[in-house]
Image (cartoon, grey):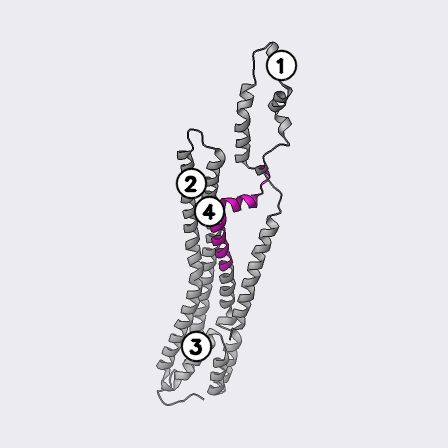
Amino acid sequence: MMRPAELLATRTWLFSVGLVLASLVLFGTSPTRSFAQDDVMAEFGEDPVEEAAPEPAGADAAEQPAGDAGAANPGGNANAAPPAADQSLLEWVFESLGAAYLIVFLALSVTLVSLFVMNMLAARRDTLCPTELVEEFSQRLAANDNQGAYDLAKADESVLGQVLAAGLAKVSKGYNKALEAMQEVGEEESMKLEHRLSYMALIGNLSPMIGLFGTVQGMISSFQVIATGGSTPKPSDLAAGISTALFTTLVGLAVAIPAIAAYNILRNRVARLLLEVGVESENLMSKFEDLSPKSGARG
């Protein structure tokens, strides 16, 4: 049976997926812009015409066709820009990344958001060390209701509740045995939290490596164009490989930086709350410190 926190985390993951897809659709309708590489292509394409235009003054200049004069006029071709100049930024990013890198980075981003939400829910004080449990547990111990205190701790799903329940279950064997049982449960719960947090660190370390792989691949592609394109390779072919190299690095860092930051923040928060769990559990169980083994059963 799923806990409420896990059910909420699953719904949040589905919401995150929908939010990412909706943002992609909305961002795709942004105003288009032209890029420097298309301007360079247009400039290179028109230079030979402009350089060949000058002719010796005389009767031959008068015989120049009107179409050539119109081609030499830069303003006349303002509405005849290449279709690639209308490419939006999002389309350029998609084309540069390619389907493979796009799917990988999108999966890492959605997974990171899901892990962040799940760890945020798990790192709350109510989940680890609720103050209500501390107050009610101490009241029942003060009233010598050890069985009621054990039932209260056992029914609580927090880490502190599980630690206290383990300690009370072994208190009849002595205070030291109770402390050992509490430490075992505390270490087990701590390992579960650290295990879930470690996936965020994995994404933070893996994402830049994928970006670096794309950088190397893009540079190899550009150098291949230079090697096989003769003395004058097309700038657009060179720009394609360089765009892949830069965008994979950019997206990889954009995923890794929040992942590493969130991992360290949540790890410190979990460590602090687990320390509070240890301190509170020992304070609550200090009542049985002088209890000798087999002299006081639970309840």
Q: Earlier in the sequence, mark 3 or mark 4?
A: 3
Residue that numbered label 4 is attached to = 248
Q: Distance between the residues labelled 4 and 1?
A: 54 Å
Q: Earlier in the sequence, mark 2 or mark 3?
A: 3
Q: Can residue 10 be seen in this view?
A: yes
Circle 1: residue type? Glu
Residue that numbered label 2 is attached to = 221
Q: Can residue 271 be seen in this view?
A: no
| Between marks 1 and 2 in the image, the one whose residue lies nearer the viewer | 1
Q: Distance between the residues labelled 1 and 2?
A: 47 Å
105 part of magenta stretch: yes
For label 1, the crowd category at 10 Å Cα-Cα, with few meaning under 14, some 14 to 19 and many 20 or more, is few
In which quarter of the view is residue 13 placed?
bottom right
58 part of magenta stretch: no
Circle 4: residue type? Thr
Q: What stretch is highlighted in magenta?
A: 85-112
Residue that numbered label 1 is attached to = 63
Report the residue at 53% width, 32% height from top: 41
Q: Which of marks 1 and 3 is nearer the N terminus?
A: 1
Circle 3: residue type? Val
- Looking at the rendered structure, which numbered label has been put on residue 250? none
Q: How far apart are marks 2 and 3 (CA)?
A: 58 Å
Indicate whether 248 appears above or below 59: below
- Mark 3 secondary-structure assignment: helix
Circle 2: residue type? Ser
For label 2, the crowd category at 10 Å Cα-Cα, with few meaning under 14, some 14 to 19 and many 20 or more, is many
Residue that numbered label 3 is attached to = 163
For label 3, the crowd category at 10 Å Cα-Cα, with few meaning under 14, some 14 to 19 and many 20 or more, is many
| Between marks 4 and 2 in the image, the one whose residue lies nearer the viewer | 2
- Mark 2 secondary-structure assignment: helix
Estimate the x, y position of residue 88 in percent, counting from the top left. Answer: 58, 43
Report the residue at 42% width, 65% height from top: 195
